[in-house]
Image (spheres, rainbow, N blue to C red):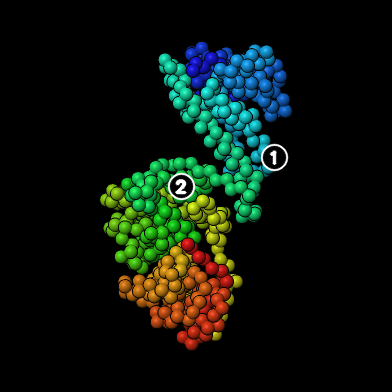
Amino acid sequence: MTIKRALLSVHDKSGIADFARGLKDLDVELVASGGTASCLKDAGIKVVEVSSLTGFPEILGGRVKTLHPVVHGGILAVRDDPAQEKELSANEISPIDMVVCNLYPFPEVVVGGCEMKEAMENVDIGGPAMIRAAAKNHEGVLVVTDPNQYDDVLKEMAGDAGVTGQMRLEFARRAFRLTSVYDSAIYKYLQGSEKDMEFPRTLWLVFEKVKDLRYGENPHQRGAFYREEFSSEYSLASAKQIQGKELSFNNIMDMDAAVAIVSGFDRPACAVVKHANPCGVAFGENAVDAYRRAHLADPVSAFGGIISLNRKVDAEAAEEIAGTFVECLIAPSYDGAALEKLKKRKNLRVMELPSLGGKGASKSLDFKRIRGGFLVQDADDEEDNAHTWETVTHRKPDEKEREAAAFAWKVVRHVKSNSIVFSTQDRTIGIGAGQMSRVDSAELALKKARGVGSYTVGTAMASDGFIPFADSVEVASKAGATVIIQPGGSIRDREVIDACNENDIAMIFTKRRHFRH
């Protein structure tokens, strides 16, 4: 296909003058809308304005300029249809072989929040109409939507074969993707905050592929990483890899869990994660102190794990971390000396996510894939209000016990259900995850603690769901725990409370559970 006539109408004018010169050198007639025409004329390039072509001026402050039969007839006409060729001739319409168009920056305008009036003024109408028309008729029209395509187009046009059907089809795919993403951004803006609305009748999700992965959870499964369009700075998709091997499917899953844990703490904190579950979480005076405490909770499970920190990594912390086998390390930042230390482990994936230094943003909605659909729910990312907690036993927890219970409660929501966590005020002592019965999780948590010689006497025990039987209280008593924190709500609450009273264990009801399936 030979390009004889091109229509240019772009908001992003990057490279447009050089591209237009290249088209002129190839004897292409140029037609352009107002702003683009002015840009090209200023660059000394001869161009026909759309208003001259249509015989109708731009009106309504530029809202209507390319919406005209002369424009869309020239784009949409089927090239080898004699009847349509006759119609073009009768209406004095010339074919348009190429449409070069990009859109008003609606997503960029609304991303930081703006008033409805400003948002609607940045909704492009004529641009998507032209792009869709050209993409629909890609057998006879090339649609160019990205300045990064300009060089490839000129190179293709300069070849003996002209513009191939393969390029026209590929560019049409990109064009429909662009308008789809653009419409989804408008839809998302108009539906408002997901937290304040009903679940939408149509769920429109747009994701962009970042890269293919070596494989999925297992080597026989294919895998890829996609970034949500317009994702926030708090997303793991915004993290930068500084060194190490390529990230795997499982690395990304585990890091997402690790980031969620430490982003919920104001104090210096570290989480060591294995198979999406924390095996150690701790506060510290600084990064290295937090890491040592978290690693100490379960050093056997920590081998080959994922480490997240919510404070800058200095040389001392890096030296400590580099001294053991770690798959990934993610933190808000690193000093130069720390990066030199980490180079000792050349395969260690070192990731930087500045937002880890502050409170994470709400995910708003959470999705779980099932065969043939999605389950959608509000994300469980709101802070619990400790003022609503209720002590249900005769003995009230003292300040130290209450702090330990609060720490355990923050951690247990990140452990696969059924989950039990034993902790002090500043670190986990034993974690039991994913067992089919709650008492089994409690026994596992106690076994983990005793396996590394940790003292469970005086600890808090947290349960992500209500405790259905007194047997879990017996495990807590055996461990020497002095306070239990749980949602409450079982038909046997009275039996469980009585068991606590008999063992002099304080019990707090939070009245909210945190299952994580």
Mark 1 Cα within 10 Å, few/some/many (few <14, many 20+)?
Answer: few
Secondary structure category for the residue under label 2: helix
| Left or right of 226 in this view: 42 | right
Task: Name the spot of residue 160 as percent of width and height, x first.
Answer: 42, 15
Residue nearer the viewer, 64 or 456: 64
Residue nearer the viewer, 348 or 128: 128
Kind of residue sitting beneath label 2: Ala
Which residue is at a point 44% across and 20% down the rendered structure image? 156
Task: Name the spot of residue 384 as percent of width and height, x first.
Answer: 56, 66
Which residue is at a point 64% across and 14% down the rendered structure image? 86
Residue 489 visible at all: yes
Q: Residue furthest right?
A: 60
Secondary structure category for the residue under label 1: helix
Residue nearer the viewer, 217 or 344: 217
Q: Which dot, 1 or 2, sits closer to the camera?
A: 2
Which residue is at a point 48% across and 63% down the rendered structure image? 516
Residue identified by numbered label 1: 117
| Left or right of 315 in this view: 81 | right
| Left or right of 517 in this view: 297 | left
Label drawn at residue 237 = 2
| Left or right of 166 in this view: 8 | right
Mark 2 Cα within 10 Å, few/some/many (few <14, many 20+)?
Answer: some
In the image, residue 478 sits, relative to residue 92, either above or below, namely below
Which residue is at a point 67% across and 35% down the rendered structure image? 121
Label drawn at residue 504 = none
In the image, residue 50 sits, relative to residue 458, either above or below, namely above
- Asked where in the image residue 60 lies, by quadrant, the reply is top right
